[in-house]
Image: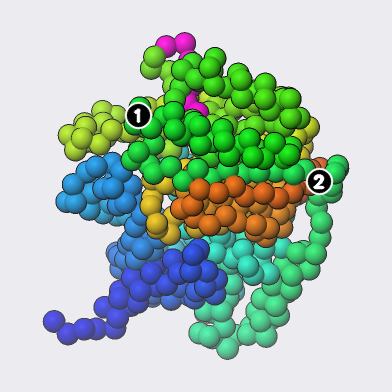
Amino acid sequence: MRFSSKHCWDLLAAIAGIVFTLAFAPFDYACLSPLALIILFASWQNSTSGRAILRGYLFGLGSFGLGVSWVYISIHDFGKADMLSSSLLTGLFVGFWALFPAFAGYLSVKTRPVCKGLMSIAAMPAIWLLVEYFRGYLVLNGFPWLQIAYSQLETPLTGFIPVVGVYGTGFLAALTASIVLFIFQTRKHRLLLTIFLVVIWTTGSVLQTVKWTRTIGDPIRVSLIQGNIIQDQKWLPENRLNTLLLYKKMTEQHWDSAVIVWPETSIPAYLSEVNEWFLLPLSQAAQQHNTDLIVSLPTRGNSENEKYNAVMTLGKETGLYRKKHLLPFGEYLPWQPVSGFILNSLSIKLGNFKSGGMDQPLLKAGGYPFITSICYEDAFGNEGIRNLADAAYLVNVTNDGWFGNSIEPYQHLQIARMRAMETGRFLLRSTNTGVTAIVAPDGRIISRAPSFTITTLNGTITPMSGMTPYARFGDAPVIGLIVLLLFVSFIYDRGILKNDVLQEQI
């Protein structure tokens, strides 16, 4: 079969998907995400809806195939599934999420007849971001990995993050790709579009100098403990005592810190099993040293089957936070009973946790309330701003040990940095194996611990007050404006089309 130009575009779409992922951590070639979208958007032009679906799907296979390849490690190395089953499940995972770029391609082609001219430049970026929002929040409890804005944390577009968040910033990145494509394809409005592009990026640079929040107290000395407990050894009963003694010993070496943070499920036992003989004496010791501990462990509710992934504060302030936003196929099983049957047949046992609910009081440590997120929860900006007005900093406890020495921990840190920028708060991020870090309100990594080492990361943060525009309003206004822009594009370009037809008839 002759290799035609349409097959070239098919191949380019797949390559563009791989290139797109190289814009994210740990590769961090930020310019490649707009470049990848330029290629993808160009491949959708003048194509049939079926071809656009194919190219979008190939893009998704390239992007997610590289970008979430770490799923295989979790299933095979720690889920103990065989190689064939692990490969099959990873392929199904990648193939499912690749449907979303395909859906964006379909919508872009279907809206083309009613969206022409200058306003059409915004159509594909708007569709792309609406599909990202749909994937990031509404499907399977949300999967916001590899959203374009996360690739732009080192570019001038970061100035927009405290104003319009991940979706507004992502739209501007996608719009950049669409404008550049239009400039190269036609001579019309080149100067106007170039000026508009310069204005967007210059505005981002100016916004980077704006301080949306302010300090409200003296610096707080903090210690983040990274235990580096191997995942497949963590929950073995014979290792429990050694794990607890390790964290206790490392904590006792840093009683001079006001706040000490342990990673997610650093205590490999339920609260009821360790409270009397371990946690209460530890809390009393912390109180004597004028220190607050932030630890993590599972808890039970009123029955054996009611389990929660939780964070607990010990010392001067005591409290409990139960994880709200659960990880599908990790902490609960959607699509029951089919998903449970498949995983049980492969001998893959996963957690079955409950959500702690949205209405929970803020925990307090170091004299100030803080926003708590457990692992995957830090991927959802709209949820992290709840009660932010009363919070002075952010704490995220994570265990990325499930993914070994892969690119996932670096992607996850990149996502967490976005939350600091959206809220204008310092972020303490304590992990089991890495990447443990202290992040400034502008997203800078102040300090970071080496991965896969037993270590403590020490530093200082400053309590912050005030609300960024994004923290005040969330994602809803941005998504509403993108929908409105898309609607206006249809109306505007349809009016132009009607005028052209009338002039031809006259």
Q: Position of residue 444 (x, y in %)?
A: 67, 60
Query: Residue 395 shows which numbered tag?
Result: none
Foreground residue among 29 and 485: 29
- The number of numbered badges drawn on the structure is 2
- The answer to whether residue 234 of the structure is visible from this angle is yes
Magenta stretch contains residue 299: yes
Residue count near mark 2 (Cα–Cα under 10 Å), binned few <14, some 14–19, many ≥20: few
Quadrant of res 224: top right
- Which of the two labelled residues, at mark 1 and mark 2, occupies the earlier sequence position? 2
In x, y percent, where is residue 50? 29, 64
User: Which range of residues does the magenta coloring cover?
Assistant: 297-303
**Magenta region includes residue 73:** no
Query: Left or right: 504 with respect to 162?
Result: left
The disc labelled 2 sits on which kind of residue? Pro
Residue type highlighted by circle 1: Glu
* Among the 4 quarters of the image, the one containing residue 359: top right
Q: Residue drawn 65% across and 32% down?
A: 293
Name the mark nearer the viewer: 1 or 2. 1
The image quadrant where one finds the C terminus is bottom right
Determine the CA span between mark 1 and mark 2.
40 Å
* Secondary structure type for disc 2: loop
In screen coordinates, is 299 left or right of 282?
Answer: left
Q: Which residue is mark 1?
A: 238
Q: Position of residue 400 (x, y in %)?
A: 45, 47
What residue is disc 2 on? 219
- Is 394 positioned to the left or the right of 63 in the image? right
Outermost residue toward the left in this view: 1
